[in-house]
Image (cartoon, grey):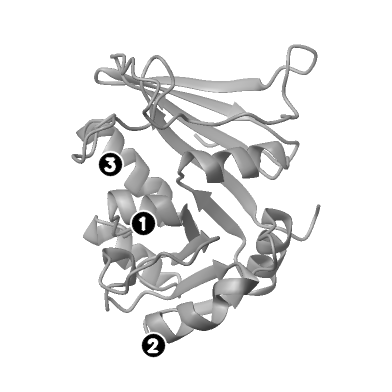
Amino acid sequence: MADRPYTLLSCSMSIDGYIDGTTESRLLLSNDLDFDRVDEVRAGVDAILVGATTVRNDNPRLRVRDAERRRTRCDRGLPEHPLKVTVTRRGRLDPSQRFFADDGTRKLVYANTRVVEPLSARLGGVSEVVDGGDPVRMEDLVRDLHVRGVRRLMVEGGGTVHTQFLAADLVDELQLVVAPFFVGDSGARRFVGEGRYPWHPGRRATLAETRQLGDVVLLRYALSDRFAPTD
C-alpha cells in the first residue's frame, strides 16, 4: 500500500512481553533516557496514534516535551505537537481526558459507525470524529491520514492496536524497548495478541539496531522495504 504514512510502532514491554500490570497505577517500563528518545521520535512525526483503551487507562498527553524540539518544528512550518489520533469501537471516551486538552493540538477520533453520532455530541468541539466504518479497518484509517497530509505516523499502543497494525502488515519500523524485569501475571496486557503476522519462522524480521539506554535496551526492527535508517 503506497498511499499510507511511513508507520513507526513504538512500545515498551517487560522481559516476558507485558506492557502494563494489573493494578490501577501505571507500570513504568522505561527510564529518563528512553523517555527523551521517545520525545525526539515524537518531534519527527506528523501524527501519534493510540487506542481508546490507552487513552482511558494511561491518560497520555502525547506532546513533545522538549522546548527546543517544539521550536524546531515551528521553524519547519509545523505545529508544536503532532496530530493526536485515537480509534474506538465502543465510543467510551471522555472529553476531560488529557488527550482532548485544549492545548492547540489537532485531534482525530476514528470511531465505529454505530457510535459516531453520540460520540460527536459528547466530544463537542474538542475533537473531530471520523466515521471509520463497521468495523474500523486500519488499512482505511491510514489511507485517510495520508489524504490529510500525514506522512510519518507513530503508533504508541496499546496491545489491540499493535496487533491490528502488525497483522495487517502496515508497520515499516518497530521500536521495541525491553525493561529489565518480569510481570508474570496473565491478567496483564501484552504487547500483542493472537494474530496471523507477516513475520514468522519462515520470514524473520530484520534487526536494524540495538541500543542500551541505561537499564533498558532498544531493539529496532525493519519491517518493510520503506525502512528509513537513522544516524
As helix, strand or loop, the secondary structure at mark 2 comes to: loop
Q: Position of residue 45 (x, y in %)?
A: 49, 57
Residue at x 64% of width, y 73% of height: 113
* Residue 164 percent across, percent down from the top left: 63, 43
Q: Residue tagged by mark 1? A: 55
What residue is shown at x 25% (from left), y 72% (from top)?
Answer: 96
The residue that disc 3 covers is 36
| Count of all numbered marks drawn on residues in the image | 3
Residue 141: image location, x then y, percent: 66, 62
Q: Is residue 120 left or right of residue 181?
A: right
Q: Is residue 11 visible?
A: yes
Q: Position of residue 56 (x, y in %)?
A: 33, 56
Asked whether 134 or 46 is in front, the reply is 134
Residue type of the residue flagged with mark 3: Asp
Earlier-in-chain disc, 1 versus 2: 1
Residue 221 higher or lower than 212, as above or below: below
Q: Give the vertical position of 194 relative to 144 (above or below).
A: above
Of labels 3 and 2, earlier in sequence is 3
Vertical order, 34 against 63 (above or below)? above
Question: Which residue has dot 2 on it?
Answer: 125
Give the residue type at disc 1: Val
